[in-house]
Amino acid sequence: MVAIYPGSFDPITNGHLDIIKRAAKLTNKLYVAVLNNSNKKGFIPIDQRVELIKNAVNEIENVEVIYFNGLLVELLKEIKIDCIIKGLRCALDYEYEAQMAHLNRDIYPNAETLFMMCSPRYSFLSSSAVREIYKFGGDIDKYVPKCVEEKIKKMEELL
Ligand code: PNS
């Protein structure tokens, strides 16, 4: 199976990485796709998010990191993949992700979304929480891959 794990990854967290590692074991090839979430204002520039994810996943052979500017279903058509993988942390995620899954399949009936429960130890973690902790001077090293921690610390100008 070939699948796509989409997200805004702003930045990639250890929770995302956990899903990527587990999804990569279930798939022949896993695309990690950075897309725009128009409800969210960007923190890290897209090209740098892609580089950070590449760095974080460089030891997983069957993972490829890509960027797409447009609808997820258009990316599915372009690379001829039908399977979307999403991580769920809690019921709130389910509400939002169920709507997205229905919507994507309504636009493109081949699009199937498979959900994976995140590991309990990451159930409270989000990119927005990481940004907030960092913004107020807290320690983010437990929550993100090392390369992300180093990168964010160099991004003082974004604060
Ligand atoms: O990590 P996120 O922010 O929850 O990821 C959401 C993302 C980027 C996967 C979602 O916003 C998305 O698919 N964006 C691309 C545009 C699109 O296809 N939107 C859904 C139909 S309106």
Image (cartoon, rainbow, N blue to C red):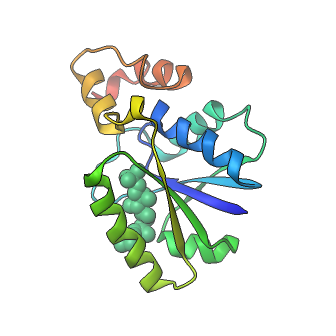
Q: Nearer the viewer, residue 43 or 103?
A: 103
107 left or right of 147?
left
Does 118 appear above or below 32? Answer: above
Q: Is residue 114 visible?
A: yes
Does 40 appear above or below 98? Answer: above
- Picture coordinates of residue 108, whole percent (x, y): 51, 84
63 left or right of 88?
right
- Residue beneath the point at 68% across and 46% down: 24
The quadrant holding residue 118 is top left
120 left or right of 134?
right
55 left or right of 94?
right
- Picture coordinates of residue 60, whole percent (x, y): 73, 37
Q: Nearer the viewer, residue 95 or 75?
A: 95
Does 79 appear above or below 31? Answer: below
- Quadrant (top left/top right/bottom left/bottom right) for the N terminus: bottom right
- Residue beneath the point at 46% across and 20% down: 149
